[in-house]
Amino acid sequence: MGMKTKLILVGGFLGAGKTTLLGEAARQLSQTGRKVGLITNDQASELVDTVYLEQTGTEVSEVSGSCFSCNFPGFMEAIDHVNAHKPADIIIAEPVGSCTDLSATILQPLKEKFADKLSVAPLSVLVDPRQLTDILDGRTAGLHPSAAYILRKQLEEADLIVINKTDLLTPLAVEILKKRTAEEWPLASVYAISAKTGEGLAAWLHEAQQRTRAGTHLAEVDYDTYAEGEAVLGWLNATIELQSQGADWDTLGRNLLNSLRSRFDSLNAAIGHVKLLIATDKGYVIGNITGAKDSLDIRESAGTGRKAQLTLNARVQMEPDLLEGIVKEEIAKAQADKITATIAVLKCLKPGRSNPTYRYGTIVG
């Protein structure tokens, strides 16, 4: 029997930095000669994460239309797709940011049904340090209480809690936060990393690959509260074709994110995340904002030129029709800068109630 593919599931709430982590982890693992595959997941297609991760040259598969839990066969098809030509040594999968109960609905069935071909890593949950601090202080991290409930349940079921964005903190603040986290969730091992700089990833990846016990405990999840927590979010995915006489695409991306931030802030609408990627024949620029006021992050460059493709994803605490209207208005304003924007695809929805394919009440193995 050949080597089994190691499957690492990285959960965590919207804005935690999961996609950045997947890209950096794939880069570090590939440098050691391992074949790495990535799986993204969303409630709809036209996903920035997939477009971005494909730019890294890694094999990427996407499960769209529902979470992994609610489409377990689709998740297994994505694994088969990644392994089609040459089986991956390691697959890292990123479930939807508003998804929880993964130990019961993904890890236990994987251990029972696919132990012959997959070695399941401990469930990792990535968390933003500001949201984590807020939750530890008994607050809701700026979220609707039912959305904050999902974040708490993600942490409760984790085998490994991975505190991200240590580049924003002092070393002392990191140590204090690790200690508080370990005290609050004693069943988890706690790691601290910066997906942006790569710091701390080696230790977490080593543990994720070496530890054999995965999904060691279950969270008690109230599916009514869970459903409400997902339903408070408007969920927009769009692909937009851009044309101009010579636009600076990086500036367009920055301005669009800033204007969307202003609109959402004026309505006191909590931002899960807003992500955009503008791709041209010269390259791409990727940018995002999360709940924190100073969170605008822009990387890479799409340069200037006549044609570009914009992929935009927004997860914001508001009704979908309002979210769609705001996004369309801000894109229309961008056209004042002599840019023609044609919406190729736009999907706006609120996630439906989670209805998992499997839900185990006991631990397997």
Image (cartoon, helix red, strand yellow):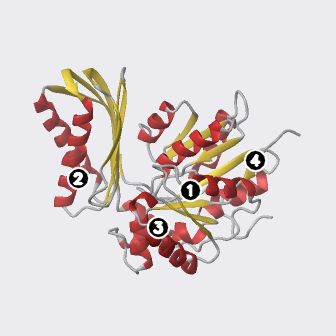
* Nearer to us: label 4 or label 3: 3
Q: Secondary structure at mark 4?
A: strand
Q: Crowding at label 1, few (<14), some or many (≥20) Cα neighbours within 10 Å?
A: some
Q: On the image, numbered disc 1 is attached to which residue?
A: 200
Q: Looking at the image, which residue sits at the far right?
A: 1
Q: Tag 3 or tag 1, which sits nearer the N-term?
A: 3
Task: Kindly report which numbered mark, 1 or 3, lies closer to the viewer in this rendering.
Answer: 3
Which residue reaches farthest front?
Answer: 171
Q: Is residue 231 above or below residue 309?
A: below
Ranked by sequence position, the earlier of labels 2 and 3 is 3
Crowd around label 2: few <14 · some 14–19 · many ≥20 (10 Å):
many
Q: Callout 2, which amino acid?
A: Arg
Identify the image quadrant of the C terminus: bottom right
- Crowd around label 3: few <14 · some 14–19 · many ≥20 (10 Å): few
Q: Earlier in the sequence, mark 2 or mark 4?
A: 4
The reply to whether discs 1 and 3 touch (Cβ–Cβ < 8 Å) is: no
Task: Say which of 317 and 164 sits in front.
Answer: 164
Amino acid identity at mark 1: Gly
Compare marks 2 and 1 and give the one earlier in the sequence: 1
Report if the CB atoms under discs 4 and 3 are less than 8 Å apart.
no
In the rendered structure, which amino acid carries the disc numbered 3?
A: Pro
Would you say 28 lies left or right of 170 here? right
Amino acid under disc 4:
Leu
Residue bearing the label numbered 4:
118
- Please indicate whether residue 109 sits to the left or right of residue 277 in the image: right
Task: Give the residue at mark 3.
Answer: 171
Mark 2 to mark 4 CA distance (whole Å): 42 Å
Considering the image in quadrants, where does the N terminus appear?
Answer: top right
Relative horizontal placement of residue 222, taking residue 319 as reference (left or right): right
The numbered dot on residue 261 is 2
